[in-house]
Amino acid sequence: MPPKIVIICGPTATGKTRLGVALAKKLNGEVISADSMQIYRHMAIGTARPSEEEMEGVPHHMMAVADPWENYSVARYVEEASACVDDVLARGKVPLLVGGTGLYIDALCAGRTFSAFRPESGHRERLRKIAARGGLPDLWRDLRRIDPEAAEKLHPNDEKRIIRALEVWYETGETITEHNRKTQAIPPRYEALTITLTYRDRQALYDRIDQRVDGMMAQGLAREVRELLAMGVPREATAMQAIGYKELADAVANNGDLAAAAETVKLRSRQYAKRQLSWFRRNPEAHWIFLENNPDFPAVVQDSTNFLREKGLP
């Protein structure tokens, strides 16, 4: 049987960090972040990375492990986060994977492999140049000929995924569809005991998101964005595409209205929360906890503890 790990997921601003810390203290566990933006250094405010005080002495992993100008990937996350999980297990403790990036969570639990990107091959750069010259429709047609199943799942303007699918083909001689089919057939690396948090009232969730954005602005999100730009982090870098950073970077660079940018951040955060909920609903094994407008946190902890005990954790 694969080893058990605890997953605490859900949309943004639902208290995942707080619950993760509380359960880690009860279970003799350690937290591994599953947030695709908390992995970057110098981005504490906009990613809501927990402070030392909020961690309450519980070890946290996979936070601030990459520079913001790096193009961090899910493949790298699986490699590095699984090493953390295995180390926690080897020391007799319980790993708690906490965050809202569903792709990272699913890939880690499955132990999914990814065809490695080899910069020296030149395929990605060649394909990007073709796309930049207006050749993206041709690339999509190439993909439709090589891997029609993958092409049908992609919008013809989805440059990043079209290039990735073609890159896999040119580097391995195997379509990305076949590669994914093989990896999905592999037994899962870990048994995921999943707790999903959300608010029972959708408007309460949106209100929490708005309050969080207001708090980030008060803490100095605009200053954090200015500092990243001053460090030379390109605006097109993956890190700067994160919600909050992209909108504020546009405003800062163009002397725009920061208040208006913050309202856009709120809107896009609410839209992202809807996408997160759609992703997490796909898991039929998840234990959902529906929070009231003023959540009873001790009750949430007890509910979570009861679920984990039923699943065999002490």
Image: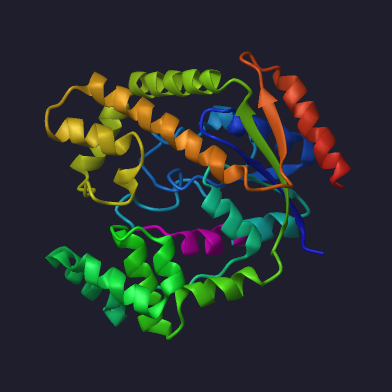
Q: Is residue 156 above or below residue 285?
A: below
At horizontal 53% and vertical 23% (from top left) the residue drawn is 205
At horizontal 42% and vertical 76% (from top left) the residue drawn is 147
Horizontal and vertical percent position of residue 47: 43, 36
At horizontal 25% and vertical 32% (from top left) the residue drawn is 248
Residue 128 in view here = no
Residue 102 in magenta? no
The C terminus, quarter of image = top right
Q: Is residue 296 above or below residue 284?
A: above
Range drawn in magenta: 71-82
Q: Is residue 185 above or below residue 70?
A: below
Q: Quadrant of residue 305?
A: top right
* Left or right of 231 in this view: 112: right
Residue 177 in view here = yes
Please tell me which residue lies in front, 44 or 115. 115
* Left or right of 253 in this view: 216: right
Scheme of image coloration: rainbow
The N terminus, quarter of image = bottom right
User: Tag count in the figure?
Assistant: 0
Horizontal and vertical percent position of residue 177: 49, 73
* Left or right of 80 in this view: 245: left
Please tell me which residue lies in front, 251 or 53. 251
Horizontal and vertical percent position of residue 141: 29, 72
Please tell me which residue lies in front, 112 or 23. 112
Horizontal and vertical percent position of residue 136: 23, 66
Extreme residue toward the bottom, this view = 173
At horizontal 60% and vertical 76% (from top left) the residue drawn is 182
Q: Main secondary structure of the magenta part?
A: helix
Q: Is residue 96 above or below residue 146?
A: above
Please tell me which residue lies in front, 239 or 148. 148
